[in-house]
Image: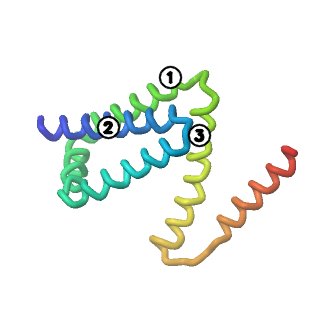
Amino acid sequence: MRKLVVVVAGIAACGAWLWAFLWTERVWLIAALLVIAGVALVLAQRVHAVGAYRDAFARHRRVAIALVALAVLGVAAALHDQPYPLLMLCTVLLFIVPCIGLTIQTGYAGIVNFAGAAFFGTGAYTAAVLAA
């Protein structure tokens, strides 16, 4: 039961941070939220909370996945008519794609290949030219 509480608390904390991040329109508040996230991750690693959370998530995987899906649907439903948070969310998701691609290529496979980044840049340049 304690591990389930850890999973629920972790997902709630991440959802609250995401909510605050998407609703913040000031640059210094975004920077402060990023610093808070970095400090929280460093502290979590120092007290070995990451491994405990991973074990709790593995033990209650179905409940955790359902809660994450519920949190994502809740954020999407709350932001359905807000243009700025949706723009920010889409921008972050857009940059996640090439980052994951480069992480897989260089981090896991050990292959130095910047073709994915070049295609991403070419697509961004093309979209900018067509939008103008």
Q: Are marks 3 and 1 in contact (CB under 8 Å)?
A: no
At numbered mark 2, what does the secondary structure look like: helix, strand or loop? Answer: helix
Q: Are marks 2 and 3 in contact (CB under 8 Å)?
A: no
Residue at 45% x, 71% y: name it. 108
Q: Residues within 10 Å of mark 3 (few under 14, many from 20)?
A: some
Distance of mark 1 from mark 2, alpha carbons?
17 Å
| Residue position marked by numbered label 1 in the rendering | 78
Residue at 65% x, 65% y: name it. 116
91 relative position to 109: left or right: right
| Amino acid at pointer 2 | Ala
| Residue position marked by numbered label 3 in the rendering | 88
Up-down relation of residue 80 to residue 100 (above or below): above
Q: Are marks 1 and 2 in contact (CB under 8 Å)?
A: no
N-term mark: 1 or 2: 2
Task: Quarter of the image for the C terminus: give it.
Answer: top right
Distance of mark 3 from mark 1, alpha carbons?
14 Å
Distance of mark 2 from mark 3, alpha carbons?
20 Å
At numbered mark 3, what does the secondary structure look like: helix, strand or loop? Answer: helix
N-term mark: 2 or 3: 2
Up-down relation of residue 56 to residue 115 (above or below): above
| Quarter of image, res 119 | bottom right
| Residue position marked by numbered label 2 in the rendering | 13
Up-down relation of residue 49 to residue 113 (above or below): above
Q: Can you give x and y, in whole percent of width and height, for residue 36 in the image?
A: 36, 48
Q: How many marks?
A: 3
| Amino acid at pointer 3 | Met
31 and 6: which is toward the camera: 31
Q: Which mark is residue 67?
A: none
Q: Can you give x and y, in whole percent of width and height, for residue 96 in the image?
A: 55, 53
| Quarter of image, res 114 | bottom right
Q: Can you give x and y, in whole percent of width and height, for residue 104 in the image?
A: 50, 66
